Image: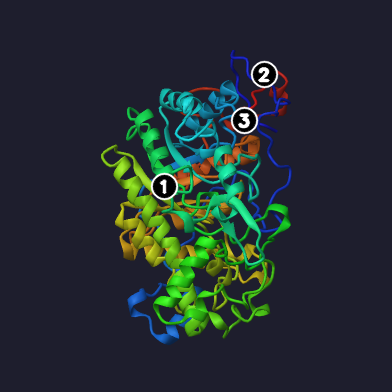
Amino acid sequence: MALTLRSSTSFINLKDNRSFKTPDHDYSSLVGFAQMKPSCQLRAKNSAQEAQILQPERISNDQREKLHGMAAPQSHNNMRVPVFVMLPLDTISIGGNLNKPRAMLASLMALKSAGVEGVMVDAWWGLVEKDGPSKYNWEGYAELIKMVEKLGLKIQVVMSFHQCGGNVGDSCSIPLPAWVLEEISKNPDLVYTDKSGRRNPEYISLGSDSLPVLRGRTPVQVYSDYMRSFRDRFKDYLGNVIVEIQVGMGPCGELRYPSYPESNGTWKFPGIGEFQCYDKYMRASLAAAAEAIGKDDWGRRGPHDAGQYNQFPEDTGFFKRDGTWNSEYGQFFLEWYSGKLLEHGEKILTAAEIIFQGTGAKLSGKVAGIHWHYKTRSHAAELTAGYYNTRHRDGYLPIARMLGKHGVVLNFTCMEMRDGEQPHEANCSPEGLVRQVKVATKTAVTELAGENALERYDGGAFSQVLATSSSDSGNGLSAFTYLRMNKRLFIADNWRNFVEFVRSMSEGGQNTRLPDSDRMGTDLYVGFIKQNNLRKISEAALV
């Protein structure tokens, strides 16, 4: 049963789904959805049920062994947490226009009535600068931003320097700009490469960040020019309508290496992934780092015993319990590998901070919630992604400090996940991971925001977000962005859960019930959605 609007406006029929096709499958194979009766109110976990986490500087060796398995306090501070909603990936068409604008307007009206703060949209490099270097087309985004402004909503805009397609939830394909792909075809080492020589065109390798490999400009210069063009085009909206710029720094817009690519079946959950350091620029950097400490042999290649994408830690010499990861060589390699990622973020955020300084818009950076194999000593899946986080080392504090240095919000995923939903053999702990990141951001005095990693519509997922959104210790969420607006969101039970969630977040996690009608006095409320009414009204395709 899809949500409908009574309106004289002629909307696109529900059967017209040419523009945005939502995958028919769900992700129940990865997580078990908690059941919730439609009338159930959302409840956050009682803080009295959770133990206090240790401060990093006070951890003994024995306590370190148990660090990632410990619980942390979760309680409400009655602070409002604004909710944003991610728009469809193909909100802007290949031609640069706003897709299905009338349906988009109807959808935004529905979100407004639910009490959301605003929406998030990807500003795809592959769409905006596709016609040639420094040739930008922002017109579709301008139409959207004006629509958002008229409805009194806010918008977060992602500087998406990665391709769309090949990852979880990708429902369309938007490659990097054609002129960039042309340069890659001439020089394949411009993209990340694994030990087997597989090239990944999702994102330009950070190994070439400071080299003029894109028709006379470095990748960082290209990203900077892009952000500067956006700032100049939308200067009148920055700080009031455009309240946040999320700076893409890797695949999926996340600060990480593409260590677990799903395209062509290369990787499947919960594989450990592979290191992405085999393009010639990364190899040269590794060799130089090894030579600098008099260990030339260490710079010839990455770890030889790190296994393959879909193996488990104990299947490898590097990641097993007492594996090479914990040796002098392993520490050298992982410090170099994770350090290069931090340098990459530093370069891009330094530019972004200068460009958007004084505009009033916040900056944010996204960090991936890699929760599988989190309970193992090596945290293999995090290591291959570039997060040097192990049983003995906090890999998120350096990231939080780097972001905080530039006043950048750390946006973290998997806020909706519970440990009990995950397959036992994967050694997952999304809850433990979120707790660790909350402590890291508090220690670094860095603002924290959150997202859900997978599409979820059930009350269990919303309750988990509520439980992690606020904290007496001051490291609650400053905002939450919900993934994602599509037709399934507007199914009656899903919509009911979502509206209850938004209102709970707006009232500091307090339980609320969905009223008989929305605050704007329209027919957009759950009680209106009945089978005998559906035949009497025109149906709107809400994206």
Q: Quick one: quadrant of the N terminus?
A: top right
Image x and y of residue 188, in percent: 60, 53
Please give the residue where the numbered disc 2 appears in the rendered image: 537
Image x and y of residue 215, in percent: 48, 42
Q: Secondary structure at mark 2?
A: loop
**Residue at the spot x=59%, y=71% of the render?**
373
- Left or right of residue 265, residue 140 in this image: left
Q: Nearer the viewer, mark 2 or mark 3?
A: 3
The foreground one among 304 and 22 is 304
Image x and y of residue 150, in percent: 42, 22
Q: Mark 1 packing: few (<14 Cα in 10 Å), some, or many (20+)?
A: many
Q: CA distance from mark 2 to mark 3?
A: 18 Å
Please give the residue where the numbered disc 3 appears in the rendered image: 543
The foreground one among 375 and 420 is 375
Q: CA distance from mark 2 to mark 1?
A: 36 Å
| Picture colour scheme | rainbow
Q: Secondary structure at mark 3?
A: loop
Earlier-in-chain disc, 2 versus 3: 2
Residue 479's mark?
Answer: 1
Circle 1: residue type: Ala
Circle 3: residue type: Val
**Residue at the spot x=64%, y=40% of the render?**
173
Circle 2: residue type: Ile
Earlier-in-chain disc, 3 versus 1: 1
How many dots with numbers?
3
Q: Is residue 80 visible?
A: yes
Earlier-in-chain disc, 2 versus 1: 1
Residue 172's mark?
Answer: none
